[in-house]
Image: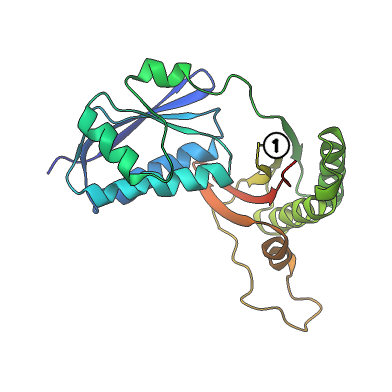
């Protein structure tokens, strides 16, 4: 068995991931972990070069479907496949939901990346009193700029709770980032702690009990967290109503 490798190379505002070796149910989690770390960096697109990959178990290709679903929900970026061999290209298309974007070369996949970057607003915050208030101001201004009055209230609550949680528990500098994709408003807070948040299982009558993540869970379409090389990102998404 050939060990799986995922070599990541930044190309402009995109990330190129060269997957080489044997893809199996055993090695698929390593591929998923590598691609998830790429999502955290929020590039314009991720190009996955599978020319050097051998598929030992076709069902292991579901790893790409899982990461593609995550990429759509957060951070709202496309996964593009470069599969020069017809056999691998066919397997990827069969395994995907809809029709994954598969190209004959890395160059073609990079050229097909999004021409326009998604609108982004970000702000760096101190872990201090007033950080949540500043986050709410940033969100309110962004929703006004993007003409999203119907998302202002839930977005303000989510951003405030994520920032408050980071300030209280991570106690590091943090970055609030709002991204507007075609389908979602994406809210993310990055901090310097690798401890992932765990919401209470149920709400309690204790007025001092933490409720922030329960509010996030109730308001967001989905939310989650991913560790990074220097901390973590906690993210949440709100759906944009169809126009």
| Dot 1 alpha-carbon crowd within 10 angstroms: few under 14, some 14 to 19, many 20 or more | many
Identify which residue, 223 or 101, lies in the foreground: 101
Image coordinates of residue 195 in percent, x first then y, are 55, 57
Instruction: Write the residue at 60% across / 61% down.
Output: 197
Residue tagged by mark 1? 180
Instruction: Write the residue at 24% across / 40% down.
Output: 4
Tell me: 69 left or right of 191.
left
Identify which residue, 168 or 236, lies in the foreground: 236
Q: Residue furthest bottom?
A: 205
Identify which residue, 170 or 224, lies in the foreground: 224
Residue 157 vertical placement versus 101 (above, below): below
Q: Which quadrant: the N terminus?
A: top left
Image coordinates of residue 113 in percent, x first then y, are 51, 22
Give SS at disc 1: strand
Tell me: 14 left or right of 16.
right
Q: Quadrant of residue 201?
A: bottom right
Tell me: 148 left or right of 217.
right
Q: Quadrant of residue 243?
A: top right
Image coordinates of residue 30 in percent, x first then y, are 32, 47
Q: Residue furthest left?
A: 1
Instruction: Write the residue at 85% across / 33% down.
Output: 145
Identify which residue, 149 or 163, lies in the foreground: 149
Instruction: Write the residue at 42% across / 46% down.
Output: 97
Tell me: 81 left or right of 91.
right
Q: What colouring method underlies this structural image? A: rainbow
């Amino acid at each position: 068995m050939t060990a799986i490798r995922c070599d990541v190379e930044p190309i402009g505002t995109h990330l190129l991931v060269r997957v080489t070796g044997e893809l199996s149910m055993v090695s698929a989690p390593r591929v998923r972990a590598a691609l998830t770390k790429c999502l955290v960096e929020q590039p314009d697109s991720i190009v996955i070069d599978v020319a050097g990959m051998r598929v030992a178990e076709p069902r292991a290709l579901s790893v790409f479907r899982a990461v593609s679903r995550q990429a759509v929900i957060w951070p709202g970026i496309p996964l593009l496949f470069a599969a020069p061999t017809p056999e691998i290209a066919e397997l990827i298309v069969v395994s995907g939901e809809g029709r994954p974007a598969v190209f004959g070369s890395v160059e073609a996949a990079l050229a097909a990346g999004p021409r326009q970057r998604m609108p982004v607003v970000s702000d760096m915050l101190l872990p201090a009193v007033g950080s949540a208030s500043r986050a709410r101001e940033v969100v309110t201004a962004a929703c006004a700029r993007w003409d999203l009055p119907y998302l202002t209230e839930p977005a303000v609550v989510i951003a405030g709770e994520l920032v408050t949680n980071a300030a209280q528990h991570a106690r590091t500098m943090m970055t609030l980032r709002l991204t507007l994709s075609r389908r979602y408003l994406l809210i993310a807070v990055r901090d310097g702690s690798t401890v992932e948040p765990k919401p209470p299982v149920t709400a309690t009558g204790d007025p001092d009990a933490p409720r922030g993540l329960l509010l996030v869970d109730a308001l967001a379409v989905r939310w989650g967290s991913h560790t990074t090389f220097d901390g973590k990102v906690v993210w949440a998404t709100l759906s944009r109503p169809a126009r």
